Image (tube, grey):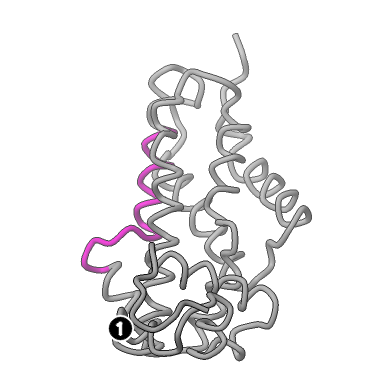
Amino acid sequence: MSPRGVAVPNVRERLFEAAERVLERDGPAALTNRAITEEAGCAKGLLYNHFTDLDDFVAQLVLNRFQRVVDGLAPLPARAGTGDVLDNLVQAARTLLGSNGPALAAAAMSRSRATIHVRQEWAGGAAGPASAEELLTGYLEAEQKLGRVSGTADCAMLGLAIAGTVHHLVMTGAAVGEEGGRLVARLVTAVAAGAVAPPP
């Protein structure tokens, strides 16, 4: 336990990581200030020194982790012309799941004020599902210009279909672990295989 008056380095990330462990182990009902700070090994009042309340903490956790996911997808359009198109899309879809996406979604959905805050931030331009959709669409359009995606394919709708369906899987907790990875691969193949041009 950090003693009173001693600065805790990277406190926000430390609390976020502790919350993820609590969520994964015990579920959203167990996510309390005390559980988070005890898991983080710091004073109980520390969370409220950095966040307005627990709803604000959960919202900031979700927004932070979504930003991380979108940052992970950011290099995707530049990979056009390299590797296999479907493999690239599968990897992108798995990135969309995040390391703890279903648990984070469950936490946000269990706290209505946190959900409202997250949606407001997304509407204001914070990294969210629309950002992921744009990156997927940009990648598909780049591949289309290279002839590796059919010229008649609607890249925007393919990007929406992949991002939207993965988001659904995250929100329902249906894509977890290795089975979730396989499910995502099947999803991408079902959605995009018909649009991927055969090799010359």
User: What residue sits right under mark 1 in the picture?
Assistant: 49
Point 50% across, 26% down: residue? 149
Q: Find numbered disc 1 in the image and state the secondary structure of the residue it sits on.
A: helix
Q: Residue 24: percent from the left, percent from the top? A: 66, 73
Point 36% across, 74% down: residue? 6
Q: Amino acid at mark 1?
A: Asn
Q: Going by the image, does 5 lie left or right of 155?
A: left
Please, is residue 30 above or below residue 157 in the view? below
Q: Residue 54: percent from the left, percent from the top? A: 41, 88
Res. 113 image quadrant:
bottom left
Res. 11 image quadrant:
bottom left
Of 74 and 141, the residue lying toward us: 74
Q: Residue 144: percent from the left, percent from the top? A: 43, 25
Res. 12 image quadrant:
bottom left
Point 59% across, 63% down: residue? 100
Q: Is residue 105 magenta?
A: no
Q: Going by the image, does 166 lie left or right of 128?
A: right
Q: What segment is highlighted magenta in the picture?
A: 123-140
Magenta part, dominant SS: helix
Please, is residue 135 above or below residue 165 in the view? above
Please, is residue 164 above or below residue 150 in the view? below
Q: Can you say which quadrant of the picture contains the C terminus?
A: top right
Q: Going by the image, does 29 lie left or right of 182?
A: left
**Residue placed farthest to the right in the image?**
179
The local crowd at label 1, few if under 14, some if 14 to 19, many if 20 or more residues have their Cα within 10 Å, is few
Q: Residue 30: percent from the left, percent from the top? A: 61, 89
**Residue placed farthest to the left in the image?**
124
Point 48% across, 45% down: residue? 158
Q: Is residue 126 magenta?
A: yes
